[in-house]
Amino acid sequence: KAGVTQTPRYLIKTRGQQVTLSCSPISGHRSVSWYQQTPGQGLQFLFEYFSETQRNKGNFPGRFSGRQFSNSRSEMNVSTLELGDSALYLCASSRVTDTQYFGPGTRLTVL
Amino acid sequence: AQSVTQLGSHVSVSEGALVLLRCNYSSSVPPYLFWYVQYPNQGLQLLLKYTSAATLVKGINGFEAEFKKSETSFHLTKPSAHMSDAAEYFCAVSPTGTASKLTFGTGTRLQVTL
C-alpha cells in the first residue's frame, strides 16, 4: 500500500507570496492532519480535516488555511508569506481515530 | 492542556549499549502516547504507541516503551544500539480516543558511536 505523498517536496517563495501544498493520504484514510516543523518551535499541529470538514485547529493565524476534497486529498495554503513561515510542512493521514502516518514533508523556504 | 517533556536534547551511546530516551507527559486523563523517529530529510515514522492496553509496548526495530502512570512517564528503550538507530526521536501525546492533534516533545537526537 502506498504511503502518504506530499508535493512538491521543496519550494522556494518570496515574502508576500502565497503557496499551496498538496497531500495524498494512504488509501482508505479519511483523516488528514498538517503539522509545521521548525528548529525554533518544533513540531506544531496546524489543522485536521475529516470528510471534507475541518475537525481540529491549532494555534496559527488565519493566513494558514486548508481544505479536503471528496477523495480525501488535502491542500494547505499559506497567504502573505513571512520569513518565519520557512519550515518543513508535514502531512499525516489516519483512519477515523487511529494512528497517524506521516508523509516525507514539503520544505518551504521563504526569501 | 496536554504536554510532553523529553529530557535531553542529545543522547550519545556506543554501538551495542542500552538506549534510553526519556519522555514525561502531562494530562488530566489517560492519554494516547506515541514515539516517532525522524531520519534526516524525511518525515516521521511510527515506532510504537500506547492506547490504554498493555503498559509495556513493543515497537519496530527492537524498541519498546513502558507506560508508568505513577511516574507519568513513557520512556523509550532498546537493549542494544545499532548505528542505524542514529536519528531524532519524538514523543507525542494525543487526547484519549483519538490519535490526531498530536502534541510533540522537543525531540532527542540520538548519536551512536563505534
Image (cartoon, coloured by chain):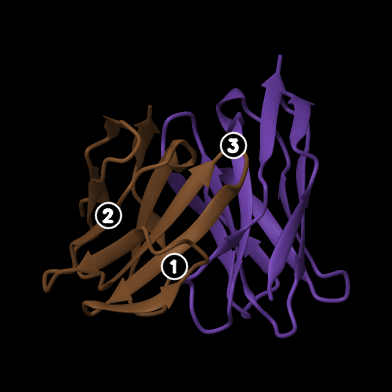
In the image, residue A30 sits, relative to residue B109, either above or below, namely: below
Residue where numbered disc 1 is placed: A99
Disc 1 element:
loop
Judging by colour alone, the chain drawn in brown in this rendered image is A
In the image, residue A57 sits, relative to residue B114, either above or below, namely: below
Residue A77 is labelled as: 2
Nearest-to-viewer mark from 3 and 2: 2
Nearer the N terminus, badge 1 or badge 2? 2
Residue A39 is labelled as: 3
- Decide: marks 1, 3 in contact (CB < 8 A)? no
In the visual, does B6 lie left or right of A94? right
Amino acid beneath label 3: Pro
| Pointers 1 and 3 within a single chain | yes
Residue found at the far left of this picture: A70
In the image, residue A19 sits, relative to residue A63, either above or below, namely: above
Amino acid beneath label 2: Asn
Q: Position of residue A104 (x, y in %)?
A: 35, 41
| Pointers 3 and 2 within a single chain | yes
C-alpha gap between disc 3 and disc 2: 21 Å
Nearest-to-viewer mark from 1 and 2: 2
C-alpha gap between disc 1 and disc 3: 25 Å
Tell me which residue sits at (49%, 67%) in the image.
Answer: A58
Disc 3 element:
loop
Q: Which of the chains bears the disc numbered 2?
A: A
